[in-house]
Image (tube, rainbow, N blue to C red):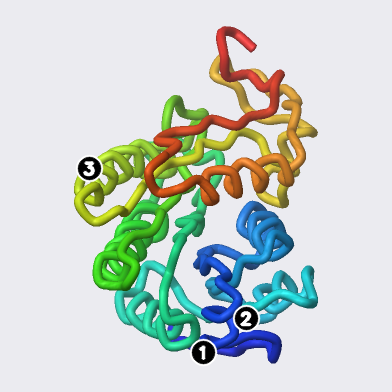
Amino acid sequence: MNTETTADATGGTDEARDQGRPVALITGAGSGIGRAVAAELLGAGWSLALAGRRVKALEETAALVPYGDTLVVQADVSQPDDVRALFTAVRDRFGRLDLLFNNAGTFGPGGVPVEDLDYAAWRHVVDTNLNGAFLCAQAAYRQMKEQDPQGGRIINNGSISAHTPRPHSVAYTATKHALTGLTKSLSLDGRPYRIAVGQIDIGNAATDMTAAMEAGALQAGGEVAPEPVMDVADVARTVRHMAELPLEANVQFATVLATAMPYVGRG
């Protein structure tokens, strides 16, 4: 996918530097959790690069806070050329990067038993959720290591599925477990360069992706049961808390979930 950039007229490299605004890049910013986190950070005065595959959706996210300083970049995180162009655009616009929220992801085909899962579908989930997260983290790591002042923060969007699976979710669950290993390794390797890396594991935030859960979701015992959800704004506030810590402090792992969802114990 070709990378295309647009930006509003309120910001720019010089203004962002002069006002001392921190700079964040959010992948998957066109909907759901990415959009909610973007609105929260824009409202708190951050400058944002919003990345995703659909420009119109990204522009709608940027418009949620009309006075915000935003850069919209069309990019598919599973494509190395797109990721390189994305980070070049961020560097050219803002001059530095303080936060990467590695949020882009896909569940893949739902309800498909492992023996029937098409390999192309498996690869799509792996390429987006794991390879995309690695490519973006690698590019952010390089920039944060070289910029002055040195350092920054990476927050990976894990999932409750980084701990335990849902039925028929082998690709999604495998990538989210792998993301935990990626988080730990990046966190260790980033220490000498003031790069803090953490992970937020989210359960049943109310987004388009989870809308069907309130009607009924397949449970481990084979029954279908409705599940509670929580306001996605509560996730966004948690990400902001993690993002605004000094680099000397880090939330390594945070779990934010609908209180009564069937995860702890027997539900």
SS class, disc 1: loop
Q: Is residue 259 above or below residue 194?
A: above
Please give the residue where the numbered disc 1 appears in the rendered image: 4
Q: Position of residue 34 (x, y in %)?
A: 61, 58
User: Can residue 259 be spotted in the picture?
Assistant: yes
Q: Position of residue 90 (x, y in %)?
A: 45, 80
Measure the alpha-carbon separation of dots 1 and 2.
8 Å
Please give the residue where the numbered disc 3 appears in the rendered image: 188
Number of numbered discs: 3
Quadrant in the picture for residue 128? bottom left
Please identify, in this view, whether the residue under mark 3 or under mark 2 is nearer the observer.
Answer: 3
Residue appearing at x 71%, y 74% in the figure? 68
Q: Position of residue 254 (x, y in %)?
A: 50, 33
Q: Is residue 130 above or below residue 160?
A: below
Q: Is the residue marked by circle 3 packed among few (<14), some (14-19), or many (20+) residues within 10 Å?
A: few
Lower sequence index among marks 3 and 1: 1
The answer to the question of whether label 1 and label 2 lie on touching residues, with beta carbons closer than 8 A, is: yes
Residue appearing at x 53%, y 72% in the figure? 51
Q: Is residue 18 above or below residue 127?
A: below
Measure the alpha-carbon separation of dots 3 and 1.
34 Å
Nearer to us in this view, 201 or 14: 14
Left or right of residue 115: residue 157: right
* The disc label shown at residue 55, or none: 2
SS class, disc 2: helix
Lower sequence index among marks 3 and 2: 2
- Quadrant the C terminus occupies: top right
Amino acid, disc 3: Leu
Lower sequence index among marks 1 and 2: 1
Please identify, in this view, whether the residue under mark 3 or under mark 1 is nearer the observer.
Answer: 3
Nearer to us in this view, 91 or 124: 91
